[in-house]
Image: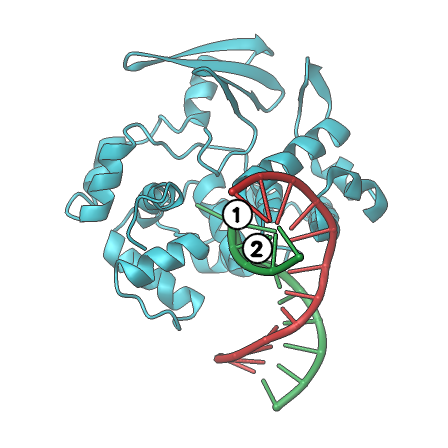
Chain colours: A cyan, B green, C red
Amino acid sequence: LLSGHSFRWKNDDGKFTGVIGSNVVELKKKGDFIISDVVFGDISESEIKKYLGLNVDYERILSSSSNDKYVSQAVKDYPGYYILGQDPYEVLITFICSTNSSVHNTRLKVANLSRLFGKRISGDYYTFPGPGKLAGLNEEEIMKAKVGYRGKYIIGTAQKLMEDDLLENLSELDDASAVEKLVDFPGVGRKVADCLLLFGYNRFNRIPLDVWMKRILVSLYGADPKMKYEEMEKFGEKKLGKYAGYVSHFLFELAREGMLPI
DNA sequence: TTCCAGGACCCTG
DNA sequence: CAGGGTCATGGA
């Protein structure tokens, strides 16, 4: 929940509180179980499970790279490190916010967008503003959310979504066609497109190549730093297997914690 | 103060 | 196509 692909959760002494859709949810870990408490809203347990990414064959995914020493180390260090099943639209906008920005800073931007332009659910919790709302803002207004130069990209992407909701039928496209469509959105390059495919559509083969993953692939797996994006991504898929994107998320976390020799 | 962050975009050569 | 500079913002 705090790993840098969802930006809306806070942790108070083991109690995680966040917004899923128009619901405020609290999560606690008790032994091998997750206890969920819907503070506000009517989200079902199965929807929460789906959001938490629990409807996947976790063991099978992890065992696909069990012969890789870095992945198996990461799996040991982060048991239960799931990729969430988030709303694609929210993933798209939040990862536009993430460009050239730290995870911490991205959280601030997402919180600002929600507080300023979302609907208040209860307490200090707000829905994430929909495309209609964001499309109607001008640059001056959205700058209040401290999104910086990404403001015009967010507005532009929201407006494009209002004309043609590509996200609805993206599932019908193969990876290459989906990426081709996605990079047409302002503020969306190959990396953000991959984040959407991995985190929003759970296409677990996609590896978002950020600065960390590039460093990892170059210094640990022998990739050539001069490889272009697609080439290095294919290289990573070859090294990390069918669920390369899923397991790369473990490596990302290890690297961020300074636990990889890169 | 300077540098960097889960990059994208635009301009040159 | 490759290589650069630029873009807001906050934390280290």
**In the rendered view, does A106 fall on the left or right side of A49?**
right
Q: Amino acid at mark 2?
A: Leu
Q: Sequence order check: which comes first, mark 2 or mark 1?
A: 1
Say few, some or many: other residues with alpha carbon within 10 Å of mark 1 (under 14 / 14 to 19 / 20 or more). some
Q: Farthest left residue?
A: A67
Mark 2 touches mark 1? (CB < 8 Å): yes
In which chain is the residue bearing label 2? A
Could you say which disc has been placed on residue A198 in the image? none
Residue A66 against residue B11 in the figure, above or below? above
What is the quadrant of the N terminus of chain A in the image? top left
Residue A209 appears in the picture as rendered: no
Q: Where residue A261 appears, x then y in whole percent?
A: 28, 52
Compared with A23, A252 (above or below) is: below
Position of C9 compared to A51: left or right? right
- In terms of depth relative to the viewer, which is nearer, A37 or B13? B13
| Circle 2 residue | A182
Q: Report x, y in % for residue A32.
A: 28, 15
Instruction: Look at the image and tell me whether residue A32 can be seen.
Output: yes
Q: Please state which of the two labelled residues, at mark 2 or mark 1, is closer to the viewer.
A: 2
Q: Residue at x 65, y 45 (%)?
A: A165
Q: Could you give the CA–CA distance between mark 2 and mark 1, rounded to whole angstroms?
A: 9 Å
Image point 36% across, 26% down: which residue? A54
Image mark 1: chain: A
Assign a secondary structure to mark 1.
helix
Q: Quadrant of the C terminus of chain A?
A: bottom left
The location of residue A203, given as percent across then percent down, is: 40, 45
Give the structural element (helix, strand or loop) at label 2.
helix
Q: Is residue A56 left or right of residue A168?
A: left
| Picture disc at residue A170 | 1
* Residue lying at 58% horizontally and 16% vertically, measured from the top left: A24
Looking at the rendered structure, the kind of residue marked 1 is Leu
